[in-house]
Amino acid sequence: KQEVTQIPAALSVPEGENLVLNCSFTDSAIYNLQWFRQDPGKGLTSLLLIQSSQREQTSGRLNASLDKSSGRSTLYIAASQPGDSATYLCAVGSSGSRLTFGEGTQLTVNP
Amino acid sequence: EPEVTQTPSHQVTQMGQEVILRCVPISNHLYFYWYRQILGQKVEFLVSFYNNEISEKSEIFDDQFSVERPDGSNFTLKIRSTKLEDSAMYFCASIRDRGGSPGELFFGEGSRLTVL
């Protein structure tokens, strides 16, 4: 059974800092990995999708990497802004496109 | 930009009542999902649906739950007799295809269910 863990659970940084969020998964037989953003009481906004054959994906200030063999992914956020404050969720796609989610990292960027 | 829409945004019900949550997936998507998130917990898979039948379900999706695509646009989740522990945010999601390189899963804003 796939298990997804995210570290740290919470992170508070000053504006402008570069930061890394970590995600690990137990079963390397994955189709893809998706990073989401969730604002309080809101839905899930997809940030980046990495296919199992890819090593990284970039969108603006976000860069996600995937090391399937070691069961790890990182989300790098450059030059963080207060508007980046949210919970970031890592989700691993296995057979049937079923996603297994981590518990998330709650990010606070202080002005 | 196309999006997944869900109604209602919030529903309050009494224990034992039936609830139907509605979703309109993105129009050219073929695979549909329900997930839920109990407050403070992980997002959990409930069920996937393709070609008018369930393709996969989790252990959470017991006989109290059912899904239906009654017409060409709506996708519904019914909870027959709600329990207190059904209180959660329910998310609908859709994907265009899930072939060799499954695409991005798009989620709706969620329906918050409160069972009293």
Image (tube, grey):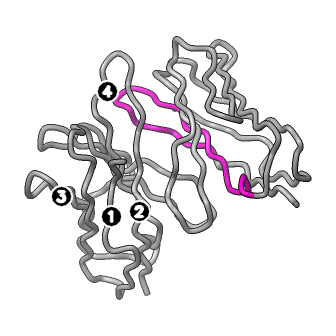
- The kind of residue tagged 4 is Arg
- The chain that hosts pointer 3 is B
Q: Amino acid at mark 1?
A: Gln
* Residues at marks 1 and 4, CA–CA distance in whole angstroms: 22 Å
Mark 1 vs 4, N-terminal side: 1
Q: Position of residue B35 (x, y in %)?
A: 41, 53
The Cα–Cα distance between marks 1 and 2, rounded to whole angstroms, is: 9 Å
Taking the spot 89% from the left edge, 43% from the top edge, the residue there is: A17
Residue density around tag 3, few if under 14, some if 14–19, many if 20 or more, within 10 Å: some
Tell me the kind of residue under disc 2: Tyr
Residue bearing mark 4: B98
Q: Residues within 10 Å of mark 4 (few under 14, many from 20)?
A: some
The residue at 39%/28% (across/down) is B103
Range of magenta residues: A83-102
Q: Nearer the viewer, mark 2 or mark 3?
A: 3
Relative to A108, B32 lies left or right: left
Give how far across and how far down residue A109 sits, in percent: 83, 55
Q: Position of residue B93 (x, y in %)?
A: 36, 48
Q: Quadrant of residue B39?
A: bottom right
Which of disc 1 and disc 3 is earlier in sequence?
1
Q: Tell me the chain of label 1.
A: B
* Type of amino acid under label 3: Asn
Ranked by sequence position, the earlier of labels 1 and 2 is 1
- Residue A91 lies in quadrant: top right
Residue B96, placed above or below residue A32: below
Q: In the rendered image, which residue does mark 2 sit on?
A: B90
Q: Nearer the viewer, mark 1 or mark 2?
A: 1
Whether label 1 touches label 2, CB < 8 Å: yes
User: Tag 1, which secondary structure?
Assistant: strand
